[in-house]
Image (cartoon, grey):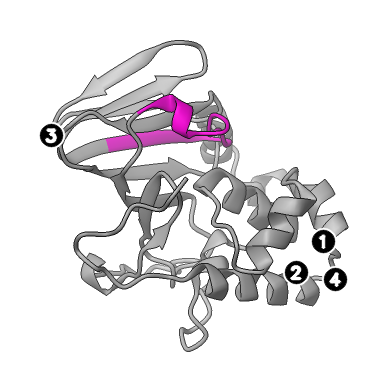
């Protein structure tokens, strides 16, 4: 499918840059492409194309690759001249301007992954432009561990789940769902829709256990 052009000509993270970053991180962590494919569940051919700058991946695949490498996903989106992500917030509060963030484009979405400079996040906030209009534009449903919140900033969106359920959202409406259920976002407005999505790194049950029994108390 041909990539839709960005009418706002936003700064973009190129496929070549992300591919080179992935290759460097993979080698640094001692993985062959075959080993990383097995550990992440991402096909070997897809990883190879990504490293060559011939393919871009969605959030779920990027998350799976990062988990297999034992790194924060933000490392894959870091430019060479950016400081490495910090291990945690460590009592800090961080402010960003979304205009300063580069976009990462896949066939169906344009993403701005916010707070890339913060490592160890339990939430991933994403500003996304939804380009897709039918579920047939996706080769598979997107799924990843945790939960997902989405708020429509402009236009309207239909979320289609692999279960057959759908949620229709207009501007200023929001949804919250289990992101381990396959899902895709479709723009149902004349222009591509814009949303703020926040993906958690854990299931609610995991967070409840962690809050009730901090790791330090389990030693």
Q: Nearer the viewer, mark 1 or mark 4?
A: 1
What residue sits 48% from the left and 84% below the top?
83
Q: Residues within 10 Å of mark 3 (few under 14, many from 20)?
A: few
Image spot of residue 78 (x, y percent): 50, 74
Q: Which residue is mark 1?
A: 33
Q: Nearer the viewer, residue 205 or 98?
A: 98
What residue sits 43% from the left and 72% below the top?
117
Q: Which residue is mark 4?
A: 30
Label at residue 172: 3
Q: Nearer the viewer, residue 147 or 157?
A: 157
What residue sits 65% from the left and 57% below the top?
66
Q: Nearer the viewer, mark 2 or mark 1?
A: 1
Q: Which residue is mark 2?
A: 26
Q: Is residue 182 left or right of residue 22?
A: left
Tell me the CA gap for discs 1 and 3. Answer: 43 Å
What residue sits 75% from the left and 46% below the top?
43
Whether pointer 2 and pointer 1 mark residues with C-beta atoms closer than 8 Å, the reply is yes
Q: Is residue 49 magenta?
A: no
| Local secondary structure at mark 4 | loop
What residue range appears in magenta? 134-150
Q: Residues within 10 Å of mark 1 (few under 14, many from 20)?
A: some
Image spot of residue 34 (x, y percent): 86, 56
């Amino acid at each position: 499918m041909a990539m839709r052009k960005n009418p706002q000509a936003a700064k973009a993270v190129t496929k070549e840059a992300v591919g080179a970053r992935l290759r460097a991180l993979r080698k640094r962590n001692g993985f062959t492409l075959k080993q990383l494919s097995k550990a992440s569940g991402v096909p070997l051919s897809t990883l190879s194309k990504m490293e060559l700058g011939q393919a871009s991946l969605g959030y779920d695949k990027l998350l799976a690759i990062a988990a297999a490498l034992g790194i924060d996903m933000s490392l894959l989106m870091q430019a060479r001249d950016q400081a490495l992500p910090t291990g945690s917030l460590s009592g800090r509060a961080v402010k960003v301007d979304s205009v300063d963030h580069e976009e990462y484009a896949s066939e169906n979405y344009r993403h701005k992954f916010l707070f890339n400079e913060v490592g160890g996040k339990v939430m991933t906030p994403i500003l996304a432009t939804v380009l897709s209009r039918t579920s047939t534009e996706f080769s598979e449903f997107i799924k990843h561990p945790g939960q997902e919140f989405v708020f429509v900033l402009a236009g309207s969106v239909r979320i289609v789940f692999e279960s057959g359920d759908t949620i229709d959202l207009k501007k200023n409406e929001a949804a919250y769902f289990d992101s381990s259920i396959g899902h895709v976002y479709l723009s149902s407005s004349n222009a591509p829709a814009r949303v703020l999505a926040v993906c958690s790194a854990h299931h609610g049950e995991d967070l409840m256990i962690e809050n009730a029994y901090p790791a330090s108390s389990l030693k």
